[in-house]
Amino acid sequence: MYDFAYHKPGSVADAVKLLTADPEARPISGGQTLLPALKHRLNRPTALVDLSGIAELKGIRKEGDTLTIGALARHVDVAESAEVTSAIPALARMAANIGDIQVRNRGTIGGSVANNDPAADYPAAVLGLGATIVTDRRRIAADDFFQGMFTTALEPGELLVAIEFPIPEKAGYAKMRNPASRYVMTGAFVARLRSGEVRVAINGAGPCVFRQAEMEKALSANWSPEAVANIRQSPEGLNSDIHGSAEYRAHLVTVMAKRAVAEAG
Amino acid sequence: MPQVTLTVNGKSHTVEVEGRTLLVELLREKLRLTGTHVGCDTSQCGACVVHVNGESVKSCTLLALQADGAQVTTIEGLAKPDGTLHPMQEAFREYHALQCGFCTPGMVMAAIDLVQKHPQGLSEREIREGLEGNLCRCTGYHNIVKAIAAAAEVMHGRRSEIARAAE
């Protein structure tokens, strides 16, 4: 790993100032993805801005129909939160199955969503629930946030502060994990919102999390695993690698969607 | 050079580090606590697991500076000053839960965190799932799982001592 300067600001404003002043500086929260990337020299930041001391980025709150999770909430915090477990149990279960215990003790929801790894879990919940990303300067709808592999709507120096999840009527998540790396081969997050809107987000299968419109339509008419059982995802544009072909991942989309609906009940 | 102050096994240390110095490098190279191992260096194998503020973390994937002000416990901090082993160490010995021993420090530290988080007890499945972040390439895990189950009984006061491995 190349060396870098290390800053630990106490406020979002100070962190943004540091990141804006130096375009080659990078924010770090849990570091469970960034540090391995730095070890591989995939990235060479001049400075790391440690966000862990910023109180504004912490906390999990339920207000009305919205569950707000601060960017620094670790996977273990989300998994064990009484607010999350009662409001969106599928989200708590998702958090409880990310990586392993040690990763969950460090990794954060903000880091995972801002990184937008195609095989990460949280992007599926954010898109599947139609959550809102709150940054230091604006609010971004999930539909506009995830833009491609490791690419989001965040501008240079812009910090993800919190995520606002609408509390759904029901939601479920199912994934097939790579047995060695534990990363998602293909996952499906399904939700029926209180507005009646049905959303289906697929992660792991393509270069970026995406919505499955055909399944959304079928589940709107008939919320049951059978409704999606015969919908075939096209393999076109899906990931194909040593872990699985695009055709295999396309097949998994239907299987995971069925399981996610069954889990949602 | 930046400085980091942290408490390791009850003793306070202030150490000069680089920004890129990992916690495991501080422990092994600066404090000479070489019980914590580096296996994969890619946060998969768990040989480097230590406790930071009571929670298990992979010390190869944490900057030393991120542990500033923290309470750190390593494998060297488990036994009592008179040499009496922690129940988890005792159980690993009694149940022959190691062969080459390379993964053992990380296994023991991860297992203690797992048991402490489950005061109501752990099923065999929960123990196996709880060890997802730790790889062992020789024992086949069976005896590790047995040792953790036995240590859990002692740590939660349901049994007074680790049963003999021959049970």
Image (cartoon, rainbow, N blue to C red):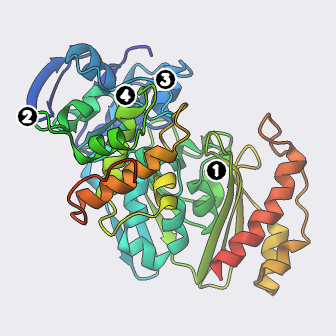
Between marks 2 and 1, how big is the CA–CA gap? 57 Å
Q: Is residue A22 visible?
A: yes
Between marks 4 and 2, how big is the CA–CA gap? 43 Å
Tags 1 and 3 touching, CB below 8 Å: no
Q: Residue at point 36% right, 74% down?
A: A82
Using residue A117 as the reference point, say whether residue B10 is left or right of it: left
| Tag nearer the camera, 1 or 3 | 3
Which residue is labeled 3 in the image?
A38
Q: Amino acid at mark 3?
A: Leu
Residue B82's disc is: 2
Residue A146's disc is: 1
Q: Chain of mark 1?
A: A
Residue A48's disc is: 4
Residue A244's disc is: none
Please identify the quarter of the rendering in which residue A263 is found. bottom right
Using residue A144 as the reference point, say whether residue B125 is left or right of it: left
Please identify the quarter of the rendering in which residue B46 is found. top left
Please identify the quarter of the rendering in which residue A142 is found. bottom right
Would you place residue B32 above or below residue A235 in this image? above
Q: Is residue A160 visible?
A: no
Q: Amino acid at mark 1?
A: Phe
- Helix or strand or loop: what does disc 3 sit on? helix
Q: Position of residue B14 (x, y in %)?
A: 11, 22
Viewer-proximal residue among A112 and B156: B156
Furthest residue in direction front, as rendered: B166
Q: Tell me if mark 3 has few (under 14), some (14-19) or many (20+) residues whose alpha carbon lies within 10 angstroms of its own.
A: some
Residues flagged by tags 1 and 4 on a common chain: yes
Mark with earlier residue (1, 4):
4
Q: Position of residue A187 (x, y in %)?
A: 70, 58
